[in-house]
Structures are given as structure tokens and as C-alpha cells.
Amino acid sequence: MIQNAQSPLLGVSFGTSFAAGYVDRNKSLTSRLNELAFVPINFSPSATVDPWSGDKGCSAMYLSQEGVAALAPDFDIELDKDMTVSQKCWIIRDLLEANEEHAVKLYTDLGKWFGLSIAWFSQFYDLKTIMIAGGTVGGYAGEVMLKGASDALSAEFPELYEKLTFMGSAGQDQAVTAAMVTK
């Protein structure tokens, strides 16, 4: 799976936050800081404010466990308000694995957010391969999310979509995956 990766590559991890790493066409890390957690992806005046940074509409609040948990009420998924964000996310993942309709729609919507974010990120990065990782999008969750991302990109940015390859690293340690990409 990883052997087919072509640079330039943007690797992202959907976890407790949204992390990223970038490898350029020379398969080298750049001198730039690739902190995409605080890149705005929602420019609405009502966008969620990140409690840590105070940034409005940043990707960490949408493309992470926070985003999955925050979307639950919009998709009629009721969760105990006393649960942690991580607990909420895992319950939603369990619902998704059971192919529960509301959870599938939630992850499809998450994918649309991600797909449109990729278009935004392409304004700053030369992109060929997008690699996803992280517990929030492991297994079937990643498949559903990537389908939503692909649908959004192919509809709204077909030229960009045609040049991209998507990869997942479900079930593989993220550090091992990243190290293999540069071989």
C-alpha cells in the first residue's frame, strides 16, 4: 500500500486534533511548519472557536474527534453529555461499524469537509498523494470519510481530484507508515 505513494505527499492524522506532515517532490521535509490544526476551514461567522487557541473555524475543531462528536446532534445521534469527546467518538465509530444510517451520514459529511479542505490546502501545497491516519478514521470510518471527500472534490474541484491519490494507514502505526513513505 505505502510503496505506491508518490511525492509530493500530505499525510494527515484525524485524532484528538488534526495533525499533518508534508513531503515535497524530492521526498524531503520542508523547512515550513506544517501545522494544519489551526488553518481555518470554516469561514462562517458562527464557526466553532477552538478553546485552546481561540482561533475560529480551524480544522482541529472539524477534522478530529472534536468534529465527530460535535456533528452528532446534527445527525440525530444522542450521546450522554457527561461523556468525554473520545468516548463519544468511539460510540459513533461503533454505530458506523454497524452501518447505522445516521453515523454513515455523519462520516460522509466529515469527508465532505475534508475534501473541500484539501482544495484549500492545495493553495499552499503541491499535492499528489493524500495519506490519512488516526483513530478517528481507521477502518470503515476512513472508507466512508474518503468516499465523502472524493465525492466533494470530484464535484467541486474535478481537476484537483483527478491528480490525487488517497491512501489510508488503518491498523498500522502512524510513525512506521510515515517512515516507509520516504523509502
Image (cartoon, helix red, strand yellow):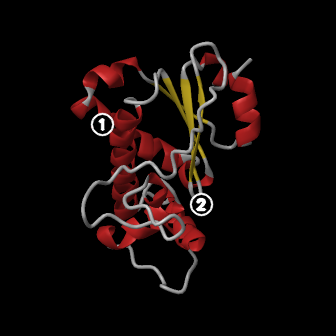
Q: Is residue 103 above or below residue 156?
A: below
Q: Nearer the viewer, residue 155 or 12?
A: 12
Residue at 38% over, 61% down: 56
Residue at 59% over, 69% down: 86
Q: Nearer the viewer, residue 136 or 93?
A: 136
Q: Is residue 95 above or below residue 83?
A: above
Residue at 39% over, 29% down: 122
Disc tally is: 2
Task: Of the two numbered discs 1 and 2 on the same chain, state the one appearing first in sequence.
Answer: 2
Q: Which mark is residue 151?
A: 1
Q: Which residue is mark 2?
A: 16
Kindly report the distance in space between the C-alpha atoms of the residues bearing marks 1 and 2.
25 Å
Q: Position of residue 87 (x, y in %)?
A: 59, 73
Q: Which mark is residue 139?
A: none
Q: Position of residue 151 (x, y in %)?
A: 30, 36
Q: Quadrant of the N terminus?
A: top right
Q: Position of residue 128 (x, y in %)?
A: 47, 20
101 relative to 33 in the view: left or right: left
Residue type at mark 1: give it: Asp
Q: Secondary structure at mark 2?
A: loop
Q: Position of residue 73 (x, y in %)?
A: 34, 73
Q: Secondary structure at mark 1?
A: helix
Residue at 43% over, 40% down: 146
Q: Nearer the viewer, residue 157 or 29?
A: 29
